[in-house]
Amino acid sequence: MNKPVVVSEETLTEPVVVADVAPAARAAGAGPAYVVLAGISVSHFLNDTMQSLIASVYPILKDAYALDFTQIGLITLAFQFTASLLQPVVGHYTDRKAQPYSLAIGMASTFFGLLLLSAAHQYLVILVAAAFVGLGSAVFHPESARIARLASGGRYGFAQSVFQLGGSFGTSMGPVLAALIVVPFGQGSIAWFSSIAFLAIIILWRIGRWYKPQITARKVTPLHAHPDGPSSRRVAVALAVLVALLFSKQLYVSSLSSYYIFYLIDRFGVSTQAAQIYLFIFLAANAVGAFLGGPLGDRFGRKIVIWISIVGALPFTLALPHVGLVGSAVLSVFIGLIISSTTSSIIVFAQELVPHRFGMISGVFFGVAFGIGGLGAAVLGKLADRTSIEFVYQVCAWLPAIGLLAVFLPKLPRHVH
């Protein structure tokens, strides 16, 4: 029962049959449930739009409360550590007992966190508000990733990319909305975005109504290991490698998300609003890359996409600290497109290694991504205080080299039906 389902990663062209796919999705000719995928992607967009506001208003908070870079990093840590700590717990629980309306309930935490952040006038209250937003993320990601897979019709990479697309575009919208609304109108305007959380609650409640009968109808079939599949030890090594690859990707993206604005202001003297637009360009490229990565993994194999997306970004990250403003914008687009295309492939690869723990694996990997980002932001902030923002980006430029560990990922044979 608790053995990995194994699928060809080099020539994958057909759906992978795993236990958590609804019977309707396995039926001959059944395709993805596009309405559900669109709903969960839009919800991801709204969720991550609200979350990205936290990093986008850092310059406002820094000036208003005389914060240093270490304190800025601790805000990111408070937000992302909550999500990192609780996502695997949520995933493990929903593996045993799915909760169709948990997404709407979790979004209420984000709703409250935004209201608290808009009214916060002490640093400790800001940290608590950020933690509440992180709690909403912890509830949202594992179960929504399961719903995306359930609605995939067997096109797992595609479904994961549609899901990631919403989140990536939501993340990219934070700086734009901060530049257009929060900067002119101040910290209190963050409360206006609670209306987005309310809209997300309505959508997620409707998705919960679709999800509930899917849980009732779902029948779990025994999973058997392919004779040529990786051993339990190889699976453990592969999972460790995937975590390391996600570390290199997420820490680099976190460095740009948290400090790219300050880097552009310090080095090129641009305004806060202009720097937020440049950050939007990078994050929008991330969104496009996140969408392309899943279908490419379905077509050509996830292992090769992982190789190309992480190691392929290395020349561009090494060049970024040594170019001008226009060059930085151009390179950030290439970096975002390439490095973000790996996310869907890493997550689906891990899910296929351990399909009988789908929620927990999704929670671990989403949680690791958030946790690494938060811890990395705090460490990088301390490093920036001791040295400079430019030095931080010279160090971070080497992070994609960790992608060379992909050589230890196993080749998964085609599943025998």
Image (cartoon, rainbow, N blue to C red):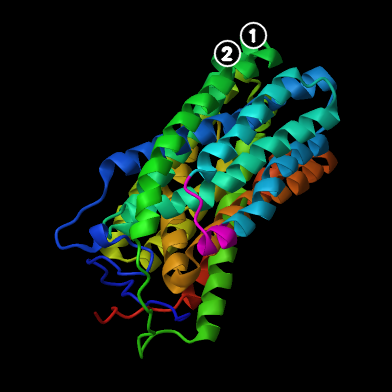
Q: Quadrant of residue 140?
A: top right
Report, in whole angstroms, how far the alpha carbon at label 2 lies from the one at label 1: 6 Å
Tag shown at residue 181: 2
State whether residue 27 appears in this view: yes
Q: Which residues are magenta?
A: 91-100
Of all residues, the one furthest to the left in this rendering is 29
Residue 322, given in percent of the width and then of the height, sits at 59, 41
Q: What is the quadrant of the C terminus in the image?
A: bottom left
Asked if residue 397 can be seen in this view, the reply is no
Where's residue 39, x and y in %?
37, 37
Residue in the foreground of this view, choosing between 98 and 374: 98
Query: Residue 59: x percent and y percent?
Result: 71, 23
Q: Quadrant of the N terminus?
A: bottom left
Q: Relative to 207, is 12 above or below? A: below
* Pointer 2 with pointer 1, Cβ within 8 A: yes
Relative image position of residue 224 (x, y in whole percent): 37, 83
Crowding around mark 1 (Cα neighbors within 10 Å: few <14, some 14 to 19, many 20+) is few
- Judge whether residue 99 is colored magenta: yes
Three-letter amino acid code of the residue under disc 2: Ile
Q: Amino acid at mark 1?
A: Phe
Residue at 85% over, 24% down: 122
Nearer the observer, 190 or 90: 90
Q: Residue at x 71, y 48 (%)?
A: 81
Q: Residue furthest top?
A: 185
Q: Which mark is residue 185?
A: 1
Residue name at image x 56 percent, y 25 percent: 175
